[in-house]
Image: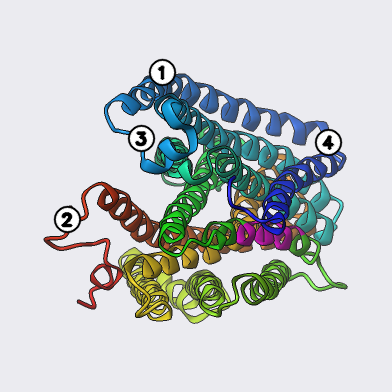
Amino acid sequence: MHGLSTTEMVMIFSVLGIAFLGLGYALFLRRQVLGEDAGTSEMQRVWGYIREGAEAYLDQQRRRILPLIGILTFVLFASAWVVQPSAEAVQEFGEQARIWVAFGRAGAFIMGAFFSMMVGRWGMRMAIQGNVRVAAAAAHLSFGDALRIAYRAGTITGMLTDGLGLLGGTLIFLIYGKAAPDALLGFGFGGTLLALFMRVGGGIYTKAADVGADLVGKVEAGIPEDDPRNAAVIADLVGDNVGDCAGMAADIFESYEVTIVSALILGLALVAQTGQLKWIVFPLVVRGIGVFSSIIGTYFVRAVGKTRNAMTAINRGFYTSALISIIGFGLLAFLYMHEWRAFASTMAGIILAIIIDELTKYFTDWRYAPVQEIARSTQTGSATTILSGLASGYESSVWAILVIAATILAAVLIYWGQGFTFVLYGVAMTGIGMLTLTGNNVAMDSYGPIADNANGIGEMVGFDEDAHQIMAELDAVGNTTKAITKGVAIGSAVIAAVSLFGSFITDVQKVDPTALTHGIRVSEPMVFIGSE
């Protein structure tokens, strides 16, 4: 890209290298996981049913999505003749600007959709490969090995999310330079489209299979959960993967894409105002630091000694990655950006991720009061159990809303007085900071269905009491980690929405400065959180 210094070019290509490092690490973990013991023939028989069901779901989904992708690709290509290329595109490509923009929008859309599909499909396949190996480790009475395999199988999905998201944004920036917004919107749209199908479709499948299996087994037939006599159990186990693994991974990948897209668009707007390219280099390097820190954090997730606390081990990896990221952001902000605001905004995002993590853990972990209260309410019947659960859920939502609003307010105050575009950039960087730990968060989410499926396999083949206890402990933690990831996904989506509103307004006002200046402007962060 024109105007980048030698140091900045080295930084950008280093980010590209880190993206490939993340993907390479995913392949390395895949080889490790597949090298583990896959269990007895009976375990593999049950596992084979789960794999067949998951592949059938993925095939049906792909057949319905591909025609829509083809139609929208043509529409985006043709849009270059409806909407004039930006001034930056004309400056970069001259008379060929329109054709460059057309191919950029369509190509980036395909890339975003394809990357999102890869994250969901490959991540889910590795989760399924991991679950039988976790069950085998539990059968050998090794809590540490079962935890390690489950988390590292989940980390493969996390590294795919990190690596592909960073790779797409960096490639578009390197090819299109200041005209990148024309293509970045297509990249974000592609990821969003696939996330919609995979998250909503997978979520509906998950709940339908889960409730159906429980109705048939527990209510009608009076048999335990995951009993091999219940044919719907396999659909239930498949549903855990398509909803909580493939669907959630695609959802977080979409937020990952959208935040980098909005940050780069707003960064390019600041380049036009200040003449400094650091505003678009900074978000990419921050993401690169996040990928690196997630890789390091993986090795801190292990059982220490004879302790059997999976949540403590997972938290150790999460907080190690957070600490490495904070140090990296600080060095980057003060040595390259030469200002504290960039560091403060990304730091606010990391703090939000940590608070969401702790809040969700408090309301969903069996060691804390809310879950214990719900358990006690079961002694007086189903009505009090439902009321107690709903009350805890509503209370947790209130705290989450307050924390997210406070974080957006903090981002506004950090850049207060610097101008509207700076404020929006600060909000976008808060989202970037929050999703710095995407590798860890997606690993935690995928860990849930892996442990759940492994427990189901153990139930169906008849584990002994000691092996069953190991799987029950891992499965219980998996329910908490899945809930934590949902909180992070929702929080990041809110911040991404504010950033996208702002980047849309910024782009439109380049053409017409008076456009969208009236009415209730949700693109204003203070309006969005209800402070004005």
Q: Is residue 53 magenta?
A: no
Secondary structure under the numbered disc 4 in the rendered image: loop
* Depicted 443 relative to depicted 422: above or below: above
Determine which of the numbered discs, if any, sits on residue 143 in the image.
none
Query: Quarter holding the C terminus?
Result: bottom left
Q: Mark 3: few, some, or many residues within 10 Å (few <14, many ≥20)?
A: some
CB atoms of marks 1 and 2 within 8 Å: no
Q: Nearer the viewer, residue 271 or 440?
A: 271
Q: Quadrant of residue 148?
A: bottom right
Image coordinates for residue 433, horizontal then vertical, percent: 55, 66
**Dot 2 or dot 3, earlier in sequence:** 3
Q: Earlier in the sequence, mark 4 or mark 3?
A: 4
Between marks 4 and 2 in the image, the one whose residue lies nearer the viewer: 2
Question: Which residue position holds label 2?
Answer: 514
Q: Position of residue 55 (x, y in %)?
A: 59, 26
Query: Circle 4 sits on which residue?
Result: 40
Rate crowding at label 2 as few (under 14), some (14 to 19) or many (20 or more) other CA atoms within 10 Å.
Answer: few
Range covered by the magenta-colored residues: 285-295
